[in-house]
Amino acid sequence: MESRNYITACSKDLKACSTCLHLCKTKQFHCHICGSKIDSNNRHGIQTTIALLITALVLYIPSNLYPIMYTTYLGETSSNTILGGVITLWEHGSYPIAVVIFVASVLVPVVKIIALGWLSYSVHTKRILYFKNNHRMFRLTEFIGRWSMVDIFVVAILVALIQMGNVMRIMPGEASIAFAAMVVTTMLAAHYFDPRLIWEKLDQSEEPRVYE
Amino acid sequence: MKQLACNECDLLIKIPELVHGYKAICPRCDFVITRFRERFRTKLLALSFSSLVFLALTLMFPFLIFTAQGRERTVYFLQSLKGMGEDTYFIVVLFMIITTIVVPVALMVGISFVVVSSRLSIGLPTSRRILKLIFQLQAWNMAEIFLLGILVSMVKIASLASVEFGWSFVAFVLYIATMAAMRIYMDKYQLWRIVSPTREAR
């Protein structure tokens, strides 16, 4: 398959409205069907993405250093960080849950920030080589991002359920706010990244190219 | 045949009329542009209505019953979200209520309105505004993540206490199931087609 067989909307001064898929002219400011803004320059989003990624990276620090919850058991209060909770679960033998929490709360945010950062960088320097794989990576980060929120829901349920005064009690920790904010910022970062940019270099190159 | 550009890689494509069960895929980036299912409007209406009913049932009955050291504690659905308190963690509580209740309700009411108005061919401009909002809100629907959260926390406290599921929990699972089924029929291309101005002119 050669790139010459493919004609992009950009080359015809057209752009698909991302809300309703209607094919608009790039000169238009708003889509005629749904009224959404038409931004002729796909690159505008990258700066927003990078800004949000940096915010997420900053928020990642307090969300791992501060405790996500405080457990009071028979008058003694102890604090748990996200990673501490994973280790406790692992020691108690609930391996599948430990893995779920580790992947959702520790691994996914980091991988997502790195992946989106890498994509923004390579799009900026036009270094993308594996179009389809990069696009797949982007789709994956967009899909798994919101599942990181599971830890916040777990804390909320535990806090609601376990309220027995000094005998047994769980209170939320400061990290929960930072963590929730971080998940939201990474979701927004993925939202502002336009996957069309991944293919841009291919569209501009003169020579025919084989995919993958 | 309608000409479109792939929303993900900008390729110009012509979309043919599809029959039930067929989908149109971008030849370059494999993005599923549209999937056509027969009578998707009726199905969407039925599913969104049943989702709303299940949500109402979820809010009414006890959600989880927690027993430890001879003491019992019954928690309702809203309580389980509001547990973090209203002062410091207010913002987190608000976020959870929005993502598990407000956004799904808005989606279901919105979809019902769009489907009914396209059937009766009235109020289509309002429908377009609502549909735009629906697709913007869709990513913020996190009810199914809450379900995973419940399962994880059940395992976490299994050693400390016993937890029973109330009737509300059954309704909640059905609420998630109907919503997941709804997602199958939420097709951008097909939904925008039924509210587009060309249809109005006809």
Image (cartoon, helix red, strand yellow):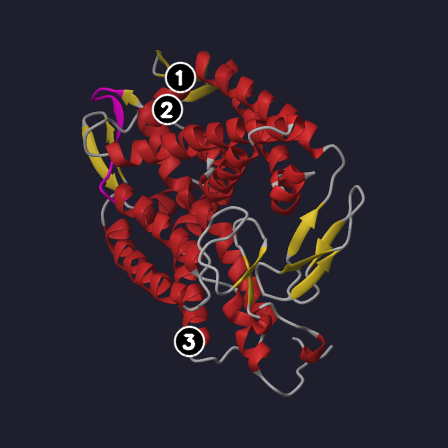
Same chain check for tags 3 and 1: no
**Residue at image coords 65%, 53%:** B33
Q: Which of the two discs, 2 and 3, sits closer to the camera?
A: 3
Q: Give the residue number, with chain letter if any, for mark 1.
A: B76
Closer mark to the observer between disc 3 and disc 1: 3
Look at mark 2 in the image and give the residue it sits on: B80
The residue type indicated by label 3 comes to His
Question: Residue A18 in the image: x percent, y percent?
Answer: 52, 54
What residue appears at the point 60 percent right and 21 percent down from the top-left corner?
B50
Q: Is residue A67 above or below residue A111?
A: above
Q: Is residue A212 above or below residue B123?
A: below
Mark 3 = which residue?
A: A124
Residue type (three-letter) at the residue carrying disc 1: Tyr
Chain letter of mark 3 equals A
Q: Marks 2 and 1, Cα distance to the nearest angstrom?
A: 6 Å
Query: In the image, is B190 to the left or to the right of B168?
Result: right
Q: Chain of mark 1?
A: B
Taking the image as shown, residue A140 lies to the left or right of residue B149, namely: right
Number of residues whose C-alpha sits closer than 10 Å to that of mark 2, classed few (under 14), some (14–19) or many (20 or more): many
Whether residue A4 appears in magenta in the rendering, the answer is: no
Residues in magenta?
Answer: A164-175
Q: Disc 2 is attached to a residue of which chain?
A: B
